[in-house]
Amino acid sequence: MDKSDFRAELQAARLAVSAERTVENIRQATLCCIAVAEQNLQDQIDSWQNATLAREVADYAAELVEHSSELQFAEQCLESMCEALYEHPRLKLELMSLRYQILKQLSEPSVELEAQIELYQDNIEAADSGRLEDVRQTTILKHDPVEWTKEWEEVIDDVDKIVEARLADHPRGMGFCHALWHLRAEVLSEQYDIQWRSPARMNPRVMFD
C-alpha cells in the first residue's frame, strides 16, 4: 500500500469519527495516523506532518483510555507514535507521560520509560532556562541542544516544509542529507534567527551519506 492509500484511509477514518465517535472508529483513525506517520519517515517526505498526527493520536488515546478494554491498545499506539516523532521534545513528553499513566493503570510500570520522561523534563527545563550546556544527549549521535528549545519546536515543521518544497527536484541519493541540513540551517538562521548545527557538524568524525 502506498502513501496515497494510507492518506485516503486516514481521511475516511476521520470522516467516520466525525460522524460517530465510536471506539472502533477512533481505533481505526488512530492506526491510520500512525501508518501515515511511519510512511512519512520511510519515504523521507512530509515528516514535518508527524507532529500534527501525533497530537491527533494523543487526543484519540485520551478518549480511548476511558474504556478499560482499550488501555493496552492506546498504550501501544502511543509507543508507536513516539517512535515516529522527532524534534518535538515537549510533544513527545506529552505522549510519553500519557503512556506512563496508562501503564500505571495496567500495573505495568516501566522504569525505562520513567527515566526517559525525567531526562526529557530535565532537558526541557534546561533549555527553557537558557542553559543549553546542561542539555544531555539522548542518542549515540550528538544533536544541537537548540533542538530542545521552545523556539525550535514551534517553527521546525514550517522550516522543514519550506526545505522540502525547495528540494523537491533534488535527487534523494547519496549526499541528500547534507543538502537538506544546509538548507534547513539557512532557513532557520535567515527567517527565524535560530543558529543550528547539523548532525554532520556535531559529529565531525562520523560519515553521513
Image: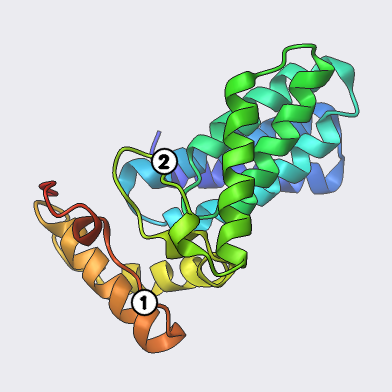
Name the residue beneath numbered marker 1: 195
Q: Are marks 1 and 2 in contact (CB under 8 Å)?
A: no
Residue closest to the eye, 131 or 115: 131
Residue placed most toward the observer, 208 or 42: 208
Amino acid found under the numbered disc labelled 1: Gln
Q: CA distance from mark 1 to mark 2?
A: 30 Å
Per the image, label 1 sits on a secondary structure element best described as loop
Residue closest to the far bottom:
190
Question: In which quadrant is the N terminus drawn?
Answer: top left
Answer left or right for 125 relative to 169: right
Q: Which residue corresponds to the image point at 61% horizontal and 66% vertical from the top-left?
A: 128
Residue plotted at (61% across, 48% down): 122
Of 1 and 94, which appears nearest the observer?
94
Q: Which residue is mark 2?
A: 39
Residue 66 percent location from the top left of the image: 90, 29
Q: What residue sits 50% from the left and 45% below the top?
A: 85
Asked if residue 161 lies left or right of residue 116, the reply is left
